[in-house]
Amino acid sequence: MQTFILRRLMIGVVILFFLSIIVFVLLSIVPGDPAKQRCGLSCKDEQITAIRHELGLDKSRLPVNVKSSPPFIDFHRHSQYGDWLTGVVTGDLGESSYYHQPVTTAIRHRLPVTFELMILTMIFTVAIGIPFGAISALFRNSPLDYVVRLSSIFGLSVPSFWIATLVLIIPLAIWGYSPPLGRTIAFTDNPIQNLKQFVPPAAVLALASAAGIMRLARSSLLEVMRQDYMRTARAKGLQERVVVLRHGLKNSLIPVVTVLGLQMAGLLGGALIIEQIFTLPGLGQYTFVELFNKDFQVVQTMTLYIGVVVILLNLAVDVSYAWFDPRIRYS
Amino acid sequence: MAKDITVASPTSISTDVFTRPQGGRLGATARQAWKLARRNPLGFVGLVIILVFGAIAVFGPAIAPYGLNEFTAGRPNEGMSIHHWFGTDAIGRDTLSRDIYGARISLSVAFVSVLGGAAIGTAFGIISGYSGGLLDSFIQRTVDTLIAFPGLLLLLIIVQALGPSFWTVVLAIMLAIIPGVTRVVRGAALSEKQNQYVEAARSIGAPTPRVLFRHILPNVLALAIVIMTTLLGAAILAEASLAFLGLGIPEPAASWGRDVSAARNNYPLKIPAAFFPGAAITLTVLGFNLLGDAIRDIADPRLRGSQS
């Protein structure tokens, strides 16, 4: 088990290194000058030069000496990529030029928002997805099954930004109601106001994820019900309830957990569109705003952060398989 | 009783197997569609939805009551009426006409990007699975990286880097599609590689490209096509999301995603202006998802009925 985790972590580091290069190169192509963005319109050339120097933008982007032939990696000269990566590895994530605030502070303030949104969404997803998926499989081809299947495929087809828009504008147009927008209210300060803020976006996000889980739970349980050990369990006289819950459902959860893990990773990275629509100051909104403000270093760091979350959650999912299915052993 | 059955079954077999398709290709296609309709009604519904939207996209200018950018179509922010079924937008353009034109953008982006992405992904997948070794590891780690890359962020960065236009949106969605296809096709290619026909082809001296594209490709093609149908819906959603965030194909083109966003920021609020473009996205994606499920059921009988 330890060697398995260690090996996976090492591959994870390689992937993160690849990711850092890809995102850096991609963002290098984006037009726009962070220094100009920071300085504003009425800015003199020498001010821009000073800011460029302060941000390290006057250095070459990649640690590659292009003038030599063939071009080779030049570690002696400082480069923007080198500086950034050194900073990330040593825990210095830099400062957002738009918010005038260190990135670490921003993450600390925004992570709770994203985290609460993720938790609520996952609660809705699990509470709707697994039971309905299981019922649909147990009463296969019944009217209920058709309703579940149709609504799940519908949930997967609906664009979340559309539902979110409707959820906001329909109550506003009819009753003049809108959930408390803008500043977030902490759950500990005012639970009701807090839930008014977080439940609508979480419900919208859960629509798609619960639909996926429903489908998956259904097909997975159907697959398990065909297995020989289910027949054995019935043959030895176990109650149907025990057969379904302990033998059926538990074994059918492996693929479900995989997808739940991936969904969780996606949400922890920040639900970009939904946070934007509901003006929730989470990590997704932060990344989005910084991308539009040409604060590329922050976007790079956030991409790496999401990469770390995805890799760690994937690993956690793989490790949890061993609990669901004792036959799985990692070596 | 028993005699009845022995008489009845051979005749039913003979009609099934030996009757030639009549009415040429079109007749055969119609019969296949009918077969799909009976066996898989939901898949048939999906097919019908896609055909309807395809027709709307192709004949858009002929159907639309007003022009795409006809500012004089009506007064700004009109409600639903007999002249403007879905109302008008903030500058007096007819919402229904814009929704009809939007089908062109949505479907063309989806088809071009999925065809391109699936083709490139399949090529990489076959090469990766067949070659093995260092090349395989390199391709697979790159795929891992791109999968770890948050999807929408990748799209946003690419479109921002190259500037929003039809081809940059297509390119971005293509790049997002490639890793997943590569991963799945590689798995299939790995198992095909073990087959004797590959061994046979190699032993008579077929060069690697020939083995790859004449022998392995046809055998993983069915899988690639199944993946493609399921990706079409996702591609439409991706284009709409980009457009909603303001990084889609710029005006004067009509895009469903952008129209939802425009309706959101419009005052006075008009529900129809937000509702109809989104409903069009939902229906189109639903059509592709239903058809994709049906095609997967048909292509992979082991999964038949187990997936919804």
Image (spheres, coloured by chain):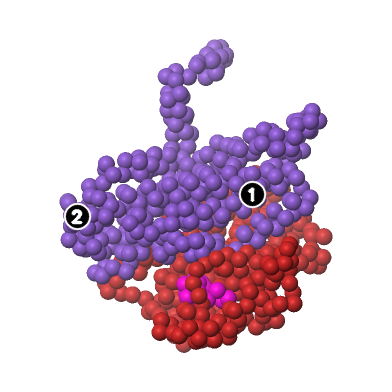
Chain colours: A red, B purple
Which residue occupies 64% across, 49% down?
B182
Percent coordinates x, y for residue A329 in the rendering = 79, 58
Q: Secondary structure at mark 1?
A: helix
Type of amino acid under label 2: Ala
- Say which residue label 2 marks: B73
Q: Is residue A282 magenta?
A: yes
Which residue occupies 31% across, 52% down?
B99
**A331, A94: nearer the viewer:** A94
User: Label 1: few (<14), some or many (≥20) within 10 Å?
Assistant: many
Location of residue B14 with respect to A84 vertically, above or below: above
**A245, B167: nearer the viewer:** B167
A117 left or right, relative to A324: left
Asked if residue A271 shows in the view, the reply is no
Q: Is residue A313 magenta?
A: no
Location of residue B77 with respect to A288 vertically, above or below: above
Q: Main secondary structure of the magenta part?
A: helix
Quadrant including the N terminus of chain B: top right
Type of amino acid under label 1: Thr
Percent coordinates x, y for residue B66 in the rendering = 23, 50
**A272, B32: nearer the viewer:** A272
User: Label 2: few (<14), some or many (≥20) within 10 Å?
Assistant: many
Which residue occupies 55% across, 74% down?
A296
- Say which residue label 1 marks: B182
* Image-quadrant location for residue B188: top right
The answer for which chain carries disc 2 is B
Kindly indicate whether the residue at mark 1 contacts the one at mark 2 (C-beta within 8 angstroms). Answer: no
Disc 2 to disc 1, C-alpha distance: 48 Å
Percent coordinates x, y for residue A318 in the rendering = 70, 61
Question: Which of disc 1 and disc 2 is earlier in sequence?
Answer: 2
Image: magenta residue range = A281-298
